[in-house]
Image (tube, rainbow, N blue to C red):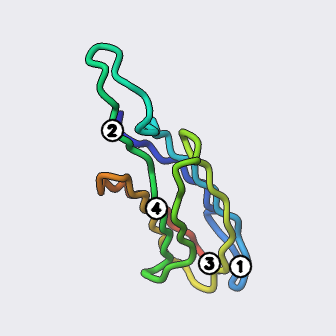
């Protein structure tokens, strides 16, 4: 199953506003501790281990995610906006697979 992100960013804000950004990514996390019922082999670990958010090319929030994270991780953080632009979001899996999404905001 491919990861599917959902992002909530206000469409507009006033210059200097601190906005709240919410993200949720649908992702079947695999701990690496379960066994395949057919073969008995361990199912390889596959979790989202990094998240990064940039605004107009500058990092506004980033974190490393530990194995205790739940499936479909939800993140909420704040950012101060002074100009119109684009938020770019990147989630990275253990195997290096990335999921990217972006949202625009207009600042008046």
Per the image, the residue denoted by label 4 is 50
Q: Are marks 2 and 4 in contact (CB under 8 Å)?
A: no
Measured from the top left, where is residue 89 in percent x and y?
46, 63
Quadrant of the rendered image containing residue 101: bottom left
Question: Quick one: label 4 or label 1, which is nearer the N terminus?
Answer: 1
Instruction: Write the residue at 48% across / 47% down.
Output: 5
Viewer-nearest residue: 97 or 78: 97
Per the image, the residue denoted by label 1 is 14
Mark 2 to mark 1: distance in Å?
46 Å
Secondary structure of residue under mark 1: loop
Q: Are marks 2 and 3 in contact (CB under 8 Å)?
A: no
Sort mark 3 into few (<14), some (14-19) or many (20+) by Cα contacts within 10 Å.
some
Q: Is residue 6 above or below residue 41?
A: below
Quadrant of the rendered image containing residue 9: bottom right
Mark 2 to mark 4: distance in Å?
18 Å
Q: Is residue 18 left or right of residue 88?
A: right
Sort mark 1 into few (<14), some (14-19) or many (20+) by Cα contacts within 10 Å.
some
Of badges 4 and 1, the one in the foreground is 4
Of badges 2 and 3, the one in the foreground is 2
* Mark seen at residue 107: 3
Question: Quick one: label 4 or label 3, which is nearer the N terminus?
Answer: 4
Mark 4 to mark 1: distance in Å?
30 Å
Mark 1 to mark 3: distance in Å?
5 Å
Q: Is residue 58 above or below residue 63?
A: below
Mark 2 to mark 3: distance in Å?
44 Å
Question: Quick one: label 2 or label 1, which is nearer the N terminus?
Answer: 1
Measured from the top left, where is residue 86 in percent x and y?
48, 71
Quadrant of the rendered image containing residue 1: top left
Per the image, the residue denoted by label 2 is 44
Instruction: Write the residue at 48% across / 68% down.
Output: 52
């Amino acid at each position: 199953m491919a990861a599917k992100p959902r992002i909530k960013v206000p469409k507009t804000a006033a210059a200097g506003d601190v906005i709240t950004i919410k993200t949720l990514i649908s992702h079947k996390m695999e701990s690496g501790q379960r066994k395949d019922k057919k073969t008995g082999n361990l199912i390889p670990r596959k979790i989202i281990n990094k998240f990064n958010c940039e605004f107009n090319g500058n990092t506004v929030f980033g974190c490393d995610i530990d194995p205790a994270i739940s499936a479909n991780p939800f993140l909420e953080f704040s950012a101060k906006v002074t100009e119109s632009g684009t938020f770019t979001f990147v989630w990275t899996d253990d195997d290096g697979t990335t999921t990217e999404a972006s949202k625009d905001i207009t600042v008046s």
